[in-house]
Every structure is written in C-alpha cells, then in structure tokens.
Amino acid sequence: MTDAPQSSPEAETTFQDDHRLAEQIVAQLRRVVLGQDAVIDEVMTALLAGGHVLLEGAPGLGKTLLVKALARTFGGRFSRIQFTPDLMPSDVTGHALYNMNERRFEIRRGPVFTHLLLADEINRAPAKTQAALLEVMQEHQVTIEGKSLQVGQPFMVLATQNPIEQEGTYPLPEAELDRFMLKVFIDYPQEQDEIALVQAVASTPSEMDYMQNVTVCAGPEQVLGLQARARAVTLDPAVLSYAVALSRATREHRGLLRGAGPRGAINLVMAARAKAFLAGRDFVIPDDVKTIAKPVLRHRLQLSADMEIEGVQADQVLDQLLDSVAAPRQ
C-alpha cells in the first residue's frame, strides 16, 4: 500500500472541524439511546455514506427513538409510516387529487418527502407497497402522474422489521434489499444500560420531554457537508481491490445460492470511507472494510437449503470469507 497523503494544516483543521461535528451528533444520540453504541455508529456510518438502513430487532428496543433523535440533531424533518397489509403505494409517495373548484389536479405529497423516513415493520406490507420506496431510495425522487419530484436532502430511509414474528409478513424482494446499504441488528441492552434507560425515561413526563435531552448541533446543509467530506476520504487501490474481492467471494462460496453484486462492493467502499471519517482518519485502512463488511453484505446473501437446515447464519459465512480473503498489509 502507498503511504497516506499528508494534509496541509489548513485542510487538516477543516477535516478536524467536520470530524468533531460528526462526533457531536453521535454523542447526542448516545445521551438518549443507551446501550446501543454499535447500532448508533452503524446508523451514523450509513448517514455519512448517504445510504439507507434496515434495522432488525424485537419491538421496544428504541428504533423509533433513534431515528427521531438523529433527525433532531440536525434539525431535519422526520416522518414515520406504519406498514400494514392494507397500506397503499400512494399512502407512501403521495397522489394526484382533482380540485373541483379550480378544475385541475393537485399533487398531495406523501410522507416520503422528508429527511429521515422511518418505515416501521416494512415487511408487514405487500410487495406492491414495499416497491413504492424503490425509486426514492435510489434516485431521491418520486414520480406522481408523470411528474418527478425531488425529496429533501439529506434523505435516508430507516426501515424496521421484527425477526421473530413471520406470520402475516411479506419478505422484501431482492431488488429492495439491495438498496439498503446496511442491515443492522439491534439487540437488548446490557443490564446496567437498561437500568439507566428505564430510570431516565420513567422519570420524564413524556417522550417529547425526553427528546429535549438531544441538542441540535448541525443543520441539513452541514450534514451534506459531512457526506462530501466522507466521500473525499482517500482510498488506496489495494484496499479497493480487497473490498471487491470480499464481495466477489460471496458469489463463489458453495453454500450460497446468491452472493453480493457490484452494488455490494460499491456500498462496502462507501461505508468504509464513512467509517474511516468517523474514526478521525482521512484514509481507509483494511480494518474499516472488515468492520463494516457484515452489515453491508449480510442481507445480500441467500443461503442454500442445506445450510439453512443446519442453522448456518449469513454472518458465519462472512466470518469464513473474512478469514480466507487476504487483506492488504498496512
């Protein structure tokens, strides 16, 4: 690998200012979402990389609280959609309504026109409604009656699904899964964290009052600046080749029916850059790729029937690949 480029003092100061701002946002989230530091870091990584997140975990673990708190840190708009079997695509994107008085159609914008969109229990709605998010997740626009409308920037979808209850659910199609940069698992907090959380929330009159613990420390334009800073993080060709090799290795594993496509490698590189930026570095190291590989790739793998019967998980396969694919020396 080539040596990391040396930044000028002025550029380094600018980088450090942006890094401190990102750290402030993370610190604000940790004030209210207790015991979920790894989840916060991964969601923040996705935000900096301009990606979307699929959050999987049992109910009541603070998924909605996390999204609301993140929106509050930069004064962004927040919308929540409860996905149900009777939810229609127009309930998500919006629709055209005929105005009798003015004798013309008016476009009523749906909840996707926001900065942070919480798609709660996304697998409760049928594929037709799930697909309403495909365009906006990829192109940051919505087409209604042939007219393309841009959503706010930054824009991020955080979708949740319950891993326990499968009755009455509709698995996400591959095309939609692939549009999520990360699949993040959220688990129960440790005992001491749970005690602190219960004490803090139970002593507050309402959730709105509890959210006052989050201080606005940025604006939407500043978040866009942080995203630009993360995209500018230096990526050595050897590290790029390593990320691509990891993604390609998923297609060659005998226990997988389907591996990650090129979008998996692209998201792996983008997330690794954001990870390096959060760590305070302006260059990516192989460990950044390794650390974020499972959240980026786990939902892009389809296990064979034999491996599912044996109870093998996608993360176990990825552990094998991380051990077998040689990383470049730093």
Image (cartoon, rainbow, N blue to C red):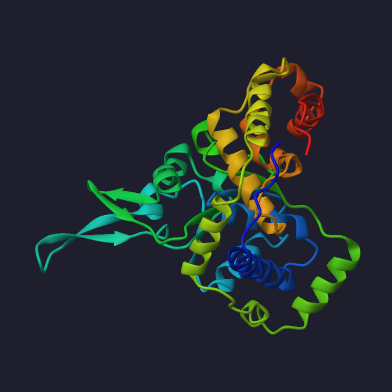
Q: As rendered, which of 232 and 103 lies closer to the eye?
A: 232
- Relative to 43, does residue 192 appear above or below in the rendering? below
Q: Residue at x 60, y 52 (%)?
A: 46
Furthest residue toward top = 254
Pinpoint residue 266: horizontal percent, then vertical percent. 56, 37
Q: Residue at x 70, y 43 (%)?
A: 3
Q: Quadrant location of residue 8?
A: bottom right
Task: Note whether residue 225 is visible.
Answer: yes
Q: As rendered, which of 285 and 37 lies closer to the eye?
A: 285
Pinpoint residue 27: horizontal percent, then vertical percent. 71, 70
Q: As rendered, which of 92 and 142 lies closer to the eye?
A: 142
- Relative to 57, does residue 27 appear above or below in the rendering? below
- Relative to 211, does residue 149 appear above or below in the rendering? above
Q: As rendered, which of 70 and 130 lies closer to the eye?
A: 70
Pinpoint residue 31: horizontal percent, then vertical percent. 73, 73
Left/right placement of residue 97 relative to residue 63 reads left
Q: Quadrant location of residue 108?
A: bottom left
Is the N terminus in the top left, top right, bottom left or bottom right quadrant?
Answer: top right
Furthest residue toward right = 192
Pinpoint residue 122: horizontal percent, then vertical percent. 55, 47
